Image: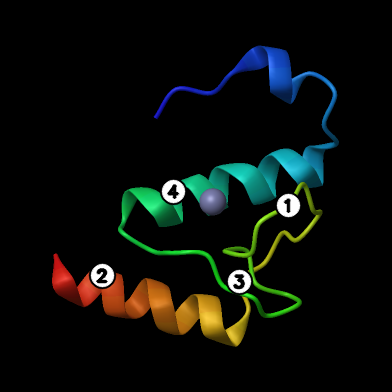
Amino acid sequence: MKLNDYHFKNMTRDQRTKTVTHEFGHALGLDHTYEKYDVMQQGMLSITSLSYTDKKSYDEAYRRY
Ligand SMILES: [Zn+2]
């Protein structure tokens, strides 16, 4: 995974953490979700820990590989 410095330079640390975790989820085959506290929802948010739904999705992806 390569990160784009142009977009990252104006983000907070929490926004960067969320973005990297979110993109890693896509690399594992996860889609977007619509739950309020999910890392896998779209948007430049400051979510830094996985929600119950995120953990369930990551666990399912892990079992696939
Ligand atoms: Zn996404």
Cα distance in 3D space between marks 4 and 2: 12 Å
Q: Mark 1 points at which residue?
A: 43
- Tell me the kind of residue under disc 2: Tyr
Instruction: Label 2: state its secondary structure.
Output: helix
Which structural element holds mark 4? helix
Q: Residues within 10 Å of mark 4 (few under 14, many from 20)?
A: some
Q: Quadrant of the C terminus?
A: bottom left
Q: Are marks 2 and 3 in contact (CB under 8 Å)?
A: no
Q: Mark 3 points at which residue?
A: 50
Q: Where is residue 36 in the image (x, y as percent from the top left)?
A: 76, 77
Q: What residue type is labelled 4?
A: Phe
Whole-angstrom CA distance, mark 3 to mark 4, is: 12 Å
Whether residue 46 is situated above or below residue 62 in the rendered picture? above
Mark linked to residue 62: 2
Task: Determine whether the residue tagged by mark 1 lies in a helix, strand or loop.
Answer: loop
Q: Residue at 67% of width from left, 80% of height from top?
A: 35
Q: Earlier in the sequence, mark 1 or mark 2?
A: 1
Residue shown at 81%/54% (left/top)?
46
